[in-house]
Amino acid sequence: MTTESNTIEISIGSALDYLDLVQTVSDCITGFMGFDEDTAHWIGMSVRESVTNAIQHGNKLDLSKKVDIKFEVSPGQLDVYVADQGNGFHVEDLPSPLDPENLLKPSGRGIFYIRSFMDLVEFRQLAGGGMEVHMVKRVSNQGD
Amino acid sequence: MKIETRTVGDVYILDCSGKITLGEGTMAVRNTVRDILKNGGRKIILNLSDVNYIDSSGIGELVSSFTTVTNQGGKLKLLNLTKKIQELLAITKLLTVFSVYDNEQAAIASF
């Protein structure tokens, strides 16, 4: 377990090819922090889902637009920030994948999964354009 | 992502291994299921025991394949869910949608 705070930042182009790389970084960080295997898996999935959204829905696969991923490693928790350069969206407008009319839709579950596995998930519109997702997982909440 | 297809009678069993994630993985499932439908197959089992990773797009592809097969008068069932896939299906209420088996013989006999 780390006793200091550290920040690891990655900036990628809007290509899905980078997803494995970002997830590998996430897995290394969560392993370093001492998260158990299941919790590390769900954090990695949450990071992957949020970066997928940023690339696909935020930046619309525009290779000239960047996705910035920041991991803030603290003794008690991991904060992850994922920012795109897209037009943003209103998170309250997203349909629930649990509603009967949405149950068989092929998409629309990513943010629901992120919210299920992380302790805190916030969305904010960035001043210079783009959307940022901030996710938190506390070390004490492993297994939740 | 790798899919090996075998048949037992008129039941197609797709042994999936690796990652079902957005892109190559989801396309492999989609194309394999559609090819079976094109060839007249209507009884399909997805064996997921060796799928070590799936994302929301992979779950979405399972749903999409399920509806495509159902709409063409067929049945698609799931076999040998990993603990993680089971959890992802459960929290999005999809375990109520799919027929799920942990025994291949029982899955085949269910058609």
Image: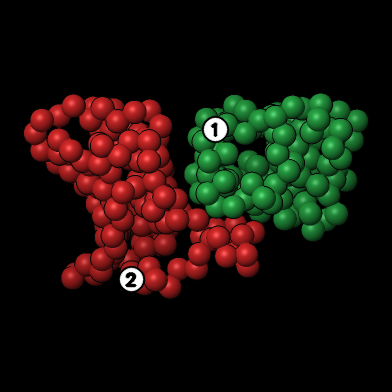
| Residue A55 shows in the view | no
- Secondary structure of residue under mark 1: helix
Q: Which color was chain B given? A: green
**A122, B36: nearer the viewer:** A122
How many angstroms separate mark 1 from mark 2 (CA)?
37 Å
Q: Quadrant of residue B50?
A: top right
**A54, A62: nearer the viewer:** A54
Q: Which mark is residue B58?
A: none
Residue at the spot x=39%, y=46% of the render?
Answer: A117
The quarter in which the C terminus of chain B is drawn is top right
Q: Chain of mark 1?
A: B
Q: How is the image coloured?
A: by chain
Q: Quadrant of residue A99?
A: bottom right
**CB atoms at circles 1 and 2 under 8 Å apart?**
no
The quarter in which the N terminus of chain B is drawn is top right
Percent x, y of residue B51 = 57, 31
Disc 2: CA contacts within 10 A as few (<14), some (14-19) or many (>=20): some
Find disc 2 in the rendering and name its residue: A87
- Residue A5 in the figure: left or right of residue B62: left
- Secondary structure of residue under mark 2: loop
Amino acid type assigned to the residue bearing label 2 in the image: Asn
Percent x, y of residue A2 = 15, 29
Disc 1: CA contacts within 10 A as few (<14), some (14-19) or many (>=20): few
- Residue B8 in the figure: left or right of residue A31: right
Find disc 1 in the rendering and name its residue: B83
Residue at the spot x=25%, y=36% of the render?
Answer: A139
Q: Quadrant of residue A53?
A: bottom left
Q: Which color was chain A given? A: red
- Residue A75 in the figure: left or right of residue B93: left
